[in-house]
Image (spheres, rainbow, N blue to C red):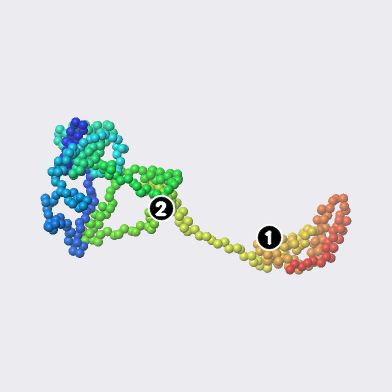
Amino acid sequence: MRSIWNGAISFGLVSIPIKLVNATESHSVSFRQIHAEDGGRIRYKKVCELDGEEVTQAEIGKAYEDADGTMIPITDEDLAALPLPTAKTIEIVAFVAAGEIDPLQMDAAYYLSANGVPAAKPYTLLREALKRSDRVAVAKYALRGRERLGMLRVVDDVIAMHGLLWPDEIRAPEGVAPETQVTVREAELDLADALMATLGEVDISSLHDDYREAVEEMIAAKAEGGAGLAPPEPTAAGRGQVIDLMAALESSVRAAKQARGEAGAEGEGAGAAEAAQADEAAEVTELRPRKRAATRTAATRTSAAAPKETGAKKSTAKTAAKKTAAAPARKSTAKTATRSTAKAPTKSTAKSTTKSTAKSTAKKQPAKQPAKQTAKKAAEKTAAKKATPRRRTA
């Protein structure tokens, strides 16, 4: 790897010659600007705005633009004369715990390589000291014309340096947090914890840039004379809008379990899907009242099946009406039964009534009275009732 800066690490009175190497590289696909009409490439030329002529890189210098637009020229000699002790030195100023460094300050990353054989031992000494102390070194260094802040730590067997932003370069998060007061329930936190536990850990090395791969595939397809890749299917409407937070968390937990192949995840997902389909397919069926119409034949049969024995105090018509009322067709059957019973012969009814009344009365009378006297009284009562005219039921 090519070094971008040579200098030394200042560790107290110990000086360690090092080379600065980029620890990262960009894999993003870069594009050129072209003329859309004919495909010609668009280039930028550096032109002096006073005379309109193009200038070369060697003719270009530095200047500071004042508030009123005045250009103040700055030369390399002016910058070299500045009292900058870190011009060629990475000066360690403190050793702190890694947790004290705010990740927001993290910037570019570099590897520090020992420059030459004499630098190997002090380099190894600093590396092992950082390992044993479980701390990181905070340092100041100068790069590309400005002094910067850095953090030194051990990565495998190499000392790495992360460029840090100065504390006053970190903006305060004012007006970023939600202004609305929101209360989070314990059940929601439990589901969030379950989702975090289900997702678990991941091997960072297994992650890759899907978008870059798609861009490369598209370029390869067009280079072969194709029309590129087919457009992706449109996402479902409303995606990303959380209507029910609890339902979204539960679905996320099920999806994460299913993606990891955990047992029972498919059953849970299928059960939820079936329940959702059942809810969608459910219909309300109106219950209609049953028909109350009854045929004359059923009413006739009901009245004909009236009991033979009738109590002394109740008439045959009343008994038939009550029996008929117990049938499904109540109103029409009761009327029909009453009419049919009223038309029945009076003699037969009187005879049966007299016999049954006599029997029931004889049973109810005390043993002291003679049976003949009891029957005689019952017959007289029945005759008196028979003489009384009956009201016909409409």
Amino acid found under the numbered disc labelled 2: Val
Left or right: where 7 falls relative to 154: left
Rendered residue at 79%/66% (across/down): 390
Rendered residue at 20%/64% (across/down): 37
Q: Classify residue 118 by image quadrant.
A: top left
How crowded pointer 2 is (Cα within 10 Å; few <14, some 14-19, many 20+) is rated as few
175 or 337, which lies in front?
A: 175
Rendered residue at 69%/61% (across/down): 325
Q: Quadrant of the N terminus?
A: top left
Q: Classify residue 313 by image quadrant.
A: bottom right
Residue 326 is tagged as 1
What secondary structure is marked by label 2? Answer: loop
Q: Position of residue 219 (x, y in %)?
A: 23, 57
Which residue is tagged 2? 242
Can see residue 99?
Answer: yes
Amino acid found under the numbered disc labelled 1: Ala
85 or 124, which lies in front?
A: 85
What secondary structure is marked by label 1? Answer: loop
- Give the number of the mark in front: 2 or 1: 2
